[in-house]
Image: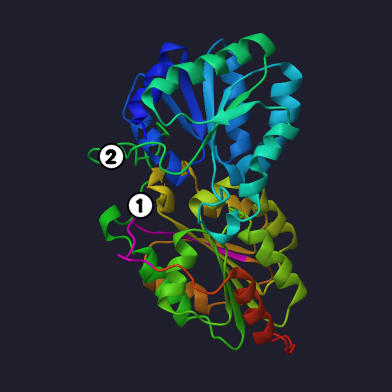
Amino acid sequence: MIEAAQFVEAARARGFDWYAGVPCSYLTPFINYLVQDPTLHYVSAANEGGAVALIAGVTLGGRRGIAMMQNSGLGNAVSPLTSLTWTFRLPQLLIVTWRGQPGVPDEPQHALMGPITPAMLDTMEIPWEMFPTDADAIGPALDRATAHIEATGRPYALVMQKGSVASYALKDGAGRLSPVSRPAPSSPIEADTRPSRHEALLRVVTNTPVDSTVVFASTGFCGRELYAIDDRPDQLYMVGSMGCVTPFALGFALARPDLQVLTIDGDGAALMRMGAFATLGAYGPPNLTHVLLDNGAHESTGGQATVSRGVSFAAVASACGYAAAVEVVTLEMLDDFLVGKTSTGVRFARVSIRTGTPDDLPRPTMPPVDVKLRLMTRISSPRSAA
């Protein structure tokens, strides 16, 4: 195990002072270190492909940069890695975490990507080696990466195993604010009085009858907290595919107009695939409701800031064609929104919540495929449209 500073400072000595990425719990020490050093540059990207493209731009501008991602995000990065960095010879160093590494217990969503990660890098002709876990190995690894970058104009990857980097704490909340430099939008309430995710999900459970509603919960703490509150057969918990809960719910809502469908989103996930707003606006049926719980953080990976502070999601939804889009700042407003389902199309509410998660939050014990089968059994008898 190494310290974040040992790698970052060795990389800086070789000209790497720009970073972009999407958080993973393995990367938390790095990100915490980077955002607390004003002489380094870290950009919180909406998705992994965006991080690769941004660092390509940094390279074009004459600097060196590092794109960081969980291996589950390699799919998002395939296009810019194969058609931007390769085509224009705009090299960069990649740090790819190895979730689902064979022989290392992990969550079910990593069961396939873990074993195929090396093959994906090989297929894209990106040479790679294991991320250094000993201080003496850092310099030689960076030298090999730099030599390849300079000789070929193509990327080089370091694959990070669990426990490679020691924890590094954020001090006084540093880095938890959005990197957006403009002032935060005004709010009728103070941040510390916003409802918690747990409180908002309790209202969701109260206002979604089991016999007529299906609830899709986004990956991370959203699904885990919903599970902890009440593990109902009408609920499905995403355990991967970040940002895909809304098109997933849309497909289901179109196929089952006899059911009310509620999809619970998060700000990081919504930012990752914001084009889904336009798809829902164009095709979203009146039986679909989209609720976004926005705490301005990737909380399940350590609380790194998202850029939601500068985004009016309700305005985005409205501009994309949602039938109704509102900003919710109290639990009473959320109740009113959930009860009032009459509309001509998909409805949206952005709920401003505070950070924080209950202690000892459990994970679903039922395998994802069994959650699916339970839901399919629950909805197996078609109901007449309301």
Magenta highlight on residue 350? yes
Q: Residue at x 37, y 19 (%)?
A: 9
Question: Closer to the camera, 126 or 340?
Answer: 126
**Label placed on residue 112:** none
In the figure, residue 121 lies in which quadrant? top right
For the record, the magenta segment spans 347-361
Mark pair 2, 1: CA separation: 29 Å
- In the depicted structure, whether residue 176 falls above or below residue 153: below
Q: Secondary structure at mark 1?
A: loop
Categorize mark 1 by other alpha carbons within 10 Å: few (<14), some (14-19), many (20+).
few
In the rendered image, residue 358, in percent from the top left (x then y), is placed at 32, 65
Q: Is residue 154 visible?
A: yes
Q: For mark 2, what is the residue?
A: 169
Question: Closer to the camera, 340 or 351?
Answer: 351
Residue extending furthest toward the front:
103
Q: Secondary structure at mark 2?
A: loop
Which quadrant of the rendered structure holds the C terminus? bottom right
- In the depicted structure, whether residue 11 falls above or below residue 316: above
Q: Residue at x 60, y 89 (%)?
A: 211
- Which amino acid type corresponds to the residue marked 2 in the rendered image? Ala
Judged by depth in the image, the label closer to the viewer, 2 or 1, is: 2
Q: Residue at x 22, y 40 (%)?
A: 172
In the rendered image, residue 255, in percent from the top left (x then y), is placed at 77, 73
Would residue 262 be found to the left or right of residue 79 on screen?
Answer: left
- Are circles 2 and 1 on residues that touch, CB within 8 Å? no
